Amino acid sequence: MIKAVAKSLEEIKSMITPYRRVLTIGCGGCVSQCLAGGQKEARALNIKLRASAASDSDALFDDITVERQCEQQFLKELDNRISTYDALISIACGAGVQFLAERFPNLPVFPGVNTQFVGITRDIGWYEERCKTCGDCVLGLTAGICPVTMCSKGLFNGPCGGPQDGHCEVDPDTPCAWIAIYERLQAQGRLDSIAEIHPTRNWQNQVPGRILVEEYRARYVENGEKT
Amino acid sequence: MKSESRLETILRCGHFALTGELGPPRGADPDAVRKKAAHLKGMVDAVNITDNQTAVVRMSSLGACLIAKQEGLEPIYQMVCRDRNRIAMQSDILGAAALGINNLLCLSGDHQKFGDHPGCKKVFDIDSIQLVSMMKTMRDEARFQGGEEITVPPKMFIGAAANPFAEPHAFRVQRLAKKVAAGADFIQTQCVYNMERFRAWLDQARDMGLTENVHILPGITPLKSLGMARYMKNNVPGMDVPDELIKRMQGVEKKDQAREGIAICCEQIQQMQEMKGLAGIHLMAIEWEHRVPEIVTQAGLLPRPEPEQG
C-alpha cells in the first residue's frame, strides 16, 4: 500500500496563511492504515489548525473523511460541502490530492502529508518500502527481493563492492539486497537465475502511467477517440 | 587489436603492466592536473582519471583525461553510472574517442550519500556490467544501445572493476565472470591488503579460466601512515586490511611510517609478479602522486616498456 507521513504543522499553516475557511479532508484508504491521513488524523489536524486561529472569529476550520480520495464516487460526496470554504487540505496520498484538485479546480488544494512509497506494514507504526512501481517486474529472477527498490544503486547484475557485514554501505540498518538475493536463490538452488547478464532494460515508468483494462476498453474508447 | 590503446598493446605484448591513478582537482585549474601528471609520466603505462570519486564534484574525468593526454600520459577514462543516463554516457564515449582517449573503465559509482551533494537525484539508468556491454556493442558492432548504427565507432579498450574481498564472497568470481562475458578486456581490483584472500580469489578466477580471457591488474594503495591504515580498515566499505599490517605500521615511528607503507607496497608488488594469472598492477597512490616515482623505482618496475603502436 501507499505509505505517507504528515507534513509539519508549521508547513501546513504557512501554506494556508491567506485562507480563513479551510476544510481538511481525510482519506480512508492506504494513508489511514499508516496513521497519516485517515479520519483520526484529519480530526487531530483540524483541531490544531482551529486552535491556532482561535482569535479570529470569522475563521472556519472543519474536517471530513471520505472512503478514498482516488475515486470520484467518493469525492462526489463533497460536492455540496465545499462551497463554504476558500481552501482545502487533503491528507490523502499525492494521487488523492490531485484527484480532489481535479474535481474542484476553482479551489486551492494543499497537501497535508508527504507521500513516501509503496510498502508493507512490518508492524503497527513500522512501514518499509518494497516497490518503485518500475512497471517491469523482475522479482521472479531475484528471489522475491526487488533490486530496483532494495539496492541503493538499483543494480541488476549483483552486488557492488561495498556491502559491510551484510549491510548496504549507504545505511548500516539496511540489509544488502544482493546478498539477500544471493542467499535466498542459493537456498532454493536457483543461482542460475542471476548467473546470466541481465540486459539493459527499457524503463516503463518514464511517462505518466495509464491502464485501460482490455475488457473495459470499449466503454471508454469509441471510434478510436477517448470519451 | 580492438582499440588504439597503448595499454592494450602493452598487455598484448605480455608486459607486466602498471597503471596509475590521478584524481582531478576540485576546480577549473588545468595546472593541478599537469602537476600530478608530471609525477606519473614515464612511471606508469596508463593512468585512471577518476570520475567524481566518492560522489564529490571535481573536474570531469573527460576534461582531465584530455589534459593528461596532452601531457603525454595514456588516460583511462573512468565512467560511473550514478550521474548519467545512457544517452549522456554514449555521447561522452563518442566525444572521448574523438579526442583520442582509448580506454574506458566502467563503474557503478559511489552512492551520492557519501558526497558533497547528498540531496541530488541518482541516475543508475544502467549498471556497470550493462555499461561494459553497451561499450562493447558500440565498439564491436558499431551500434548504439538503442540499436541504431554508429558511423564511426569508438574504439575503446574496456575495463571494469572487481572487489575480491566484498560479500558474498562466493559470488565475487561469478560477478567477475559476468563482467568478462559482458566484454571487459581488463580488470582493476579494489586495493589489496589481504594477500591470502586475494590469492584465493585469483585461484578461483584461474580455475574458471577467467585469467586467460581478461587482463587482471590488482589494485595496490600504499599506506601513508598508521592513521590511514586504520581508516582504510574501519571506514572504507569493502576494504580488508589485516591486523598484521596495522601492527607492522604500529611498530615503526610516525616519521618512518610512510617509508614502511612503501616497503609493504613493494613487497606486495613483488609477490604479485610471481602469481600466475596477473597481467600487471594498478597502483593507486591516493593524493600521493609525487611519491609514485620513488615507489616504482623501489619496486624495480622501471623502465616502462615502449611498445610500437598499432
Image: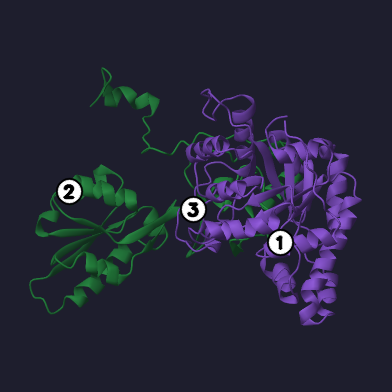
Q: Are marks 1 and 3 on the same chain?
A: no
Of residues B33 and A185, the one nearer the viewer is B33
| Residue A70 % position (x, y) | 31, 46
The reply to whether the C-beta atoms of the residues labelled 1 and 3 are less than 8 Å apart is no
Regarding mark 2 in the picture, which secondary structure is present there? loop
Amino acid type assigned to the residue bearing label 3 in the image:
Gly
**Relative to residue B300, is residue A191 drawn left or right?**
left
- The answer for how far apart the CA atoms under marks 2 and 1 are is 63 Å
Q: Which residue is mark 2?
A: A104
The chain coloured green in the image: A
Amino acid type assigned to the residue bearing label 1 in the image:
Ala
Note whether residue A4 is visible. Answer: yes
| Residue A202 % position (x, y) | 50, 33
Of residues A74 and B40, the one nearer the viewer is B40
Regarding mark 3 in the picture, which secondary structure is present there? strand
Quadrant where the N terminus of chain B is found in the figure: top right
Amino acid type assigned to the residue bearing label 2 in the image:
Phe
User: Where is B6 relative to B242, above or below?
Assistant: above
Note whether residue A145 is visible. Answer: no
Q: Earlier in the sequence, mark 3 or mark 2?
A: 2
